[in-house]
Image (cartoon, rainbow, N blue to C red):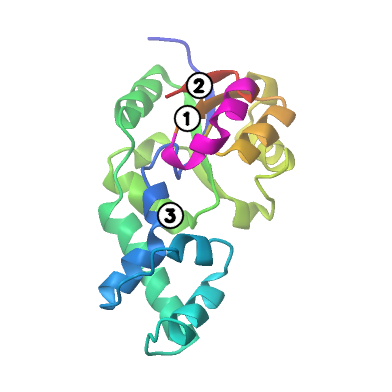
């Protein structure tokens, strides 16, 4: 038996190898609809809502349909990915299972949908390891501030200074540090441009 720990895991880009799906979601959807995505698609839709992206697909790319219907199809595509396809990042399953064996108390704090998070974790064989799955939506807080990490600690009965947070996004790493938690930063290709700052902010890095 090793030392038990209190751990808060982010999901996307930390436990689950899902950031590539989010990054290429527009292209994946358009290709399914038989439309070749423009080369600058990522840049064009990067800061758009799903509704705005759908409107762009209709007006600029000639996709048939209405905004509501397209948004529904995109959400359905996301759901299928979580329920049936997305895999854990390398080494995650072994690590989570070993912490579970030690008796560590673990939860997930994600900005994704709770049901989809549970479905992805259960399909990948580690769902039972987590005492709870919290989402930014259910807590009514953003990962851009320390309050969400303090609230999660409170709900789990963790002391922030004795809690380890695993995160990949710079803004969330800063927020967890501000909450007084010990932060382990996980490398993902989506955080490569922030990696130098992440390295100087987090307590430990995993690359």
Q: Nearer the viewer, residue 202 or 145?
A: 202
What label sits on residue 205 in the rendered view?
2
Provide the residue span drawn in magenta.
Answer: 188-200
Q: Secondary structure at mark 1?
A: strand
Q: Nearer the viewer, mark 3 or mark 2?
A: 3
Residue 179 point in image, percent of width and height: 72, 31
C-beta proximity under 8 Å, tags 1 and 2: yes
- Furthest-front residue in this view: 39
Q: How far apart, in angstroms, are the residues tagged by discs 1 and 3?
A: 18 Å
* 94 lies left or right of 133: left
> Residue at the location (45% across, 45% down)?
12
- Furthest-bottom residue in this view: 65
Q: Which residue is mark 1?
A: 186
* 155 lies left or right of 109: right
What label sits on residue 23 in the rendered view?
3
Residue 181 point in image, percent of width and height: 66, 25
Q: How far apart, in angstroms, are the residues tagged by discs 3 and 2?
A: 23 Å
Identify the image quadrant of residue 153. top right
If the image is split into quadrants, where does the C terminus sit? top left
> Residue at the location (49% across, 58% down)?
113
Q: Secondary structure at mark 2?
A: strand
Residue 80 point in image, percent of width and height: 31, 63
User: Of callouts 3 and 2, which one flags the residue occurring earlier in the amino acid sequence?
Assistant: 3
Q: Secondary structure at mark 3?
A: helix
Mark 1 burial class by Cα count in 10 Å: few <14, some 14-19, many 20+:
many
Mark yes or no: residue 134 visible: yes
Mark 3 burial class by Cα count in 10 Å: few <14, some 14-19, many 20+:
few
Q: Nearer the viewer, mark 1 or mark 3?
A: 3
Q: In the picture shown, does residue 4 fall above or below 94?
A: above
């Amino acid at each position: 038996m090793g030392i038990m720990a209190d751990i808060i895991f982010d999901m996307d880009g930390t436990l689950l190898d899902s950031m590539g799906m989010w990054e290429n979601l527009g292209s994946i959807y358009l290709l399914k609809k038989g439309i070749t995505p423009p080369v600058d698609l990522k840049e064009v839709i990067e800061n758009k809502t799903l509704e705005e992206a759908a409107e762009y697909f209709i007006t600029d790319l000639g996709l048939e349909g209405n905004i509501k219907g397209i948004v529904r199809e995109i959400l359905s595509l996301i759901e299928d990915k979580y329920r049936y396809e997305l895999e854990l990042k390398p080494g995650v399953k072994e690590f989570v299972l070993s912490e579970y064996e030690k008796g560590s108390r673990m939860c997930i704090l994600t900005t994704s949908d709770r049901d989809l998070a549970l479905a992805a974790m259960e399909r990948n064989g580690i769902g039972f390891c987590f005492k709870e799955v919290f989402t930014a939506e259910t807590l009514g807080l953003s990962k851009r501030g320390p309050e969400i990490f303090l609230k999660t600690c409170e709900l789990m009965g963790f002391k922030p200074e004795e809690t380890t947070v695993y995160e990949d996004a710079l803004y969330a790493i800063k927020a967890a540090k501000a909450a007084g938690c010990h932060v382990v930063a996980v490398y993902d290709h989506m955080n490569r441009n922030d990696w130098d700052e992440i390295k100087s902010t987090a307590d430990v890095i995993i690359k």
